[in-house]
Image: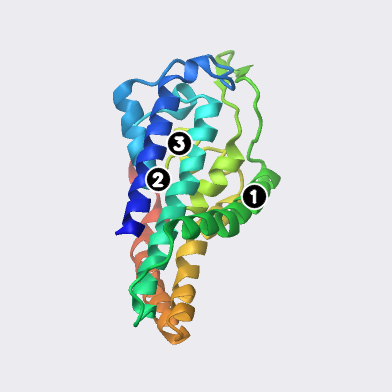
Amino acid sequence: TRYAGGVLLISVVTLLFTYVLQRIQQWLPLNPQGLGNVGQHLAFNTAASFTTNTNWQSYTPETTMSYLTQMIGLATHNFWSAAMGIAVAIAFVRGFARHSVKTLGSFWVDFTRANLYVLLPLAVVGALLLVSQGAIQNFDSYTKATTVEGVAQTIPQGPLASQEAIKMIGTNGGGFFNANSAHPYENPTPFSNFLQMLYIFIIPAGLTYTFGKMVKDTRQGWAIFAAMSVLFFAGVVVTYHYEQAGNPNLT
């Protein structure tokens, strides 16, 4: 019950923090476009979804959220909610591994370790790799451009790569731009696309080995990994032909 209490407590605190941040963003720094405050219903919807790792994105980020809100509110939630998921998974494994012990450990210790030793190092390296491929990371105002047809165009900017990395590593949704990883700034090259798919797999796949190590039988961990792999490749077999064929309406 204490472990569950820790999960609920940090969920409530971080939810309220992100809600308030959205509601006052127009008076805070790092808002070069002068975006207004987020409405109360949308702000609560967004805060609740990011807290629960659902990351339901019912808004257009580049016209709704300031840089500060994206970084301090949403990107940090991508860390917090993923760390909570890892912590609960570890507690679940301890329930199998600790046959004669009635405790599950400290949620706060697990939460801190997940952030500092797993998510943060992966996200730093992951963000730098994305920047190397052309993902943007800046605090510039949006760029005004004129197309070859003479039409005015606004090109969004912002600290994207840092949020994109943890979005994928923490298996979160809610990208920096409305198109998410279909946006060329979020996913500029085939290699960045490969990296982002790899990021999604790293922690879930790694936790299967962690399970085997914690229960002192790595074969069980590999069995779970094998089951996950079978499900994944079955999905690939079913969908690959149709994904490669494209939309027939466009032909």
Residue appearing at x 63%, y 40% in the figure: 135
Mark 1 and mark 3 in contact? Answer it, CB < 8 Å.
Answer: no
| Type of the residue with mark 1 | Val
**Position of 78 relative to 176 (above/below):** below
Left or right relative to 215: residue 186: right
Q: Position of residue 31 (x, y in %)?
A: 56, 20
Residue appearing at x 52%, y 55% in the figure: 112
Helix, strand or loop at disc 3? loop
Residue denoted by label 3:
179
Q: Few, some or many C-alpha atoms within 10 Å of disc 3 (few <14, some 14-19, many ≥20)?
A: few
Q: Disc number at residue 10?
A: 2
First-in-chain label (3 vs 2): 2
Q: Quadrant of residue 154?
A: top right
Q: Disc number at residue 124?
A: 1
As drawn, the residue found furthest toward the right would be 132
Residue appearing at x 51%, y 40% in the figure: 75
Cα separation between marks 3 and 2: 30 Å
Q: Nearer the viewer, mark 1 or mark 3?
A: 1
Along the viewing direction, whichever of 236 and 89 lies nearer the viewer: 89
**Position of 188 relative to 230 (above/below):** above
Mark 2 and mark 1 in contact? Answer it, CB < 8 Å.
Answer: no
First-in-chain label (1 vs 3): 1
Quadrant showing the N terminus: bottom left
Q: Quadrant of residue 118?
A: bottom right
